[in-house]
Amino acid sequence: MATLKLKGGALYVSVIISILISIILSLFITVAYYNTRSVQAQILLTQLNLSLESGFEIAQSDYYNPSLGSTWQKMPYNNDSVIVKKMAWGCFILIDVKAKNTHFKLHKTGLFGSPASTDTALMVAEQNRPIGLAGKIKFHGSCYFPKAGIKSAYIEGTSFSDLNSVKPYIKTSPAYIPGIDENYLKTIEQVQSNISPFTDSLILFIPEMLNRSFNNKTAVVHQGSITLSHAVLSNNIKLIAYDIITVENSCVLNNVLLIARKVIFKQGFKGTVHVIAKDTVITEDNCEFSYPSSFCVYSAHTSDSASLKVRGIFFGLQCKFKGGLLAVNNKEQTSRMMIKTNKQFELIGNAYSSDYTDAQGNLYGSLICKTLLLQTPSGVYENHLLNCLVDPKRYGAHLTVPCWLTQKEKLYTCAKWF
């Protein structure tokens, strides 16, 4: 049988091979193009992450300007832009950073403080009188007491005889306890008195349930007095009252900020909450505050009617608190600040009182105050401790606490990322 030959067969084969080669080359070029785009996008995203971290460095520096919280600021060495917002959130510092470039946007919010001290357990100012110890006393860190030292005391039917067990921890008190950073107090005052149109958004009523992202403006409720019952509120929410905020144990709060003259937590409340009060914070029995919570009692101005009263933070029986406690007067005030605990109390964090502290219970952190003032059913004892464990080492290595003391250089760490 004769074989049929196609004229120009070699030419057809050449054309087909050329087309195949063109397709393969086009595929290679396309893959290379998208690979280059992917690498470029990854580089831009990595660069933007670095700009985001730079925003946190800016917020933690002495060069931070509050105006950065309302306008986009172009980074000097690339096309990235950032908005850096910084404010007091209770005793901690809330830092919120947004970063963007042509292709991406990033957002990150953290609650910042400083590393907890693992050395200082307790510090009081020089009083020229010894500290009386009674009941079960244990120290696991340096205790700065007056030059007169310590003595055994008999209170509530108990005494303390093993003075040698605590003497290795005793050091000499300074004439004055360390001061609170003035800029820190100014920030607290601004949060108490100002509502910013750039960062806050007023709402008319308290919703039964709201989880507000820090990517949005802060949801703010401003009323004369507030009672919270059966509400479930989380994150970027600020409740402000001219007078009293009362929180029932049926209410669930998670990282919410409360600002008022006085704040009361009813028996059995549990949550994570931040408070800035001008007068008093009171917790009834069996309340638990998860980490990182904070209570701050401070007012730049005190009314005449309160000039002689004792203000501060007062805990009921069997309460637990994880975070920071601050009760401080400014130099012009004549009222007295007090942090009041009891023998069933547990603190994981740090506490500072510009005047008195009744230090009882288990204190896993550092406590600084001017004077120890013990209150029992039988009387009031100045410069005395009863049934107290102070141990800054147990949790200190992994704990972030409020950074409120005056320091030349402040080291910031994050207590919680949102």
Image: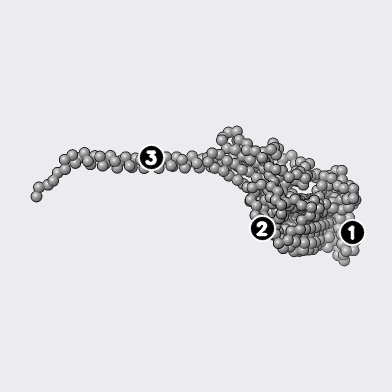
* Residue 174 seen in the figure: no
Q: Which mark is residue 293?
A: none
Is the image coloured rainbow, by chain, by secondary structure, or in one colour? one colour
> In the structure shown, which secondary structural element does the residue marked by tag 1 occupy?
strand
Q: Amino acid at mark 3?
A: Ile
| Residue at image coords 80%, 48% | 298
Answer with mark 1 or mark 3, whichever residue precedes in sequence.
3
Q: Which residue is mark 1?
A: 380
Answer with mark 3 or mark 2, whichever residue precedes in sequence.
3
| Residue at image coords 71%, 43% | 196
Q: Which residue is mark 2?
A: 209
| Residue at image coords 67%, 53% | 235
Foreground pick, 219 / 330? 219
- Give the left or right position of residue 3, taking residue 66 as reference: left
- Give the left or right position of residue 36, taking residue 94 as reference: left
Q: Amino acid at mark 2?
A: Met
Disc 3: CA contacts within 10 A as few (<14), some (14-19) or many (>=20)? few
Distance from label 1 to label 3 (Cα)? 85 Å
**Which marked residue is nearer to the observer: mark 1 or mark 2?**
2
Foreground pick, 408 / 96? 96
Residue 372 drawn at (x, y percent): 85, 54
Distance from label 1 to label 2 (Cα)? 44 Å
Q: Amino acid at mark 1?
A: Val
Distance from label 3 to label 2 (Cα)? 54 Å
> In the structure shown, which secondary structural element does the residue marked by tag 2 occupy?
strand
Residue 382 drawn at (x, y percent): 89, 55
Q: Which mark is residue 29?
A: 3
Residue 142 drawn at (x, y percent): 78, 51
Answer with mark 1 or mark 2, whichever residue precedes in sequence.
2
* Residue 104 seen in the figure: yes
Residue 43 drawn at (x, y percent): 51, 40
